[in-house]
Amino acid sequence: MKKPLFLVVLLAVVATLSSFLFAEGGYQVGDKAADFKLKNVDGKLVSLAGNSAAKGYIVVFTCNTCPYAKAYEDRIIALHQKYAPQGYPVVAINPNDPQIAPGDSYAEMQKQASSKKYPFAYVFDESQEVARTYGATRTPHVYVLQRTGAADFKVAYIGAIDNNTEDAKAATAKYVEQALADLMAGKAATTSATKAVGCTIKWKKKA
């Protein structure tokens, strides 16, 4: 009886470690971010290298349906409006599988972007490879990138937009804004990583 019990415990430990490693994967602050080409709601492909004037990007993994993403929607728009003119536009990426979350389909993305008049690119990570590469786990989950070369970008900040998921005015720590202020002052982000709070990404079911 002891041997089967040992195997059960061993399998449980392996499963736990695998889950931990998967959650901890992806980029760390200071890593070089690989470029991508994802389809925007206007049908055009968007890439990091596609905007030669960008000093960096505010990459936000988000979606239509998550209550947290909805709560941050206006704040994401405000970030783009404030920082795109300073060289840091928003690129919003929807990583959710529409088979699990039908409200996050490409067609629904187009409707949402039109309804809210998104001033930024809203692209679909249909294969979910970009989200996996970055290590995104939540919506919203933010990665601030800083240009370091002609086509090179490094990760300068990872985490939440601020410290209040319900009310922007009640936020006492605006992590993304502070990180951008530091970067534009020629410094590293004072707070370079925080915990992303939101809905879990809806991953495709394994065949």
Image (tube, helix red, strand yellow):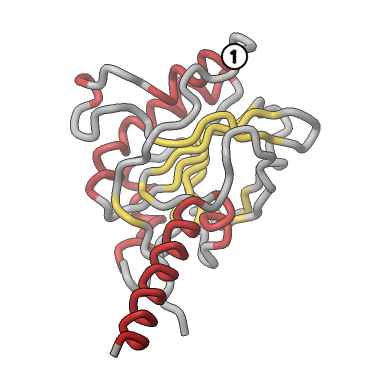
Which residue is under mark 1? Answer: 184
Q: Position of residue 58 (x, y in %)?
A: 52, 33
**Residue 42 seen in the figure:** no
Q: How many numbered badges does the structure rendering display?
A: 1
- Please rate how many residues cluster around mark 1, counting C-alpha atoms within 10 Å: few if below 14, some from 14 to 19, many from 20: some
Q: Name the residue: 35% across, 61% down.
A: 104
The N terminus lies in quadrant: bottom left
Answer left or right for 147 relative to 80: right
Is 125 left or right of 197, judged from the image as shown? right
> Which residue appears farthest toward the right when viewing the image?
150
Q: In terms of depth relative to the viewer, which is nearer, 44 or 197?
A: 197
Side of 49 relative to 178 (left or right):
right
Q: Residue furthest bottom?
A: 1
Relative to 16, residue 157 above or below: above
Residue type beneath disc 1:
Met
- Residue 121 location (% of width, % of height): 51, 43
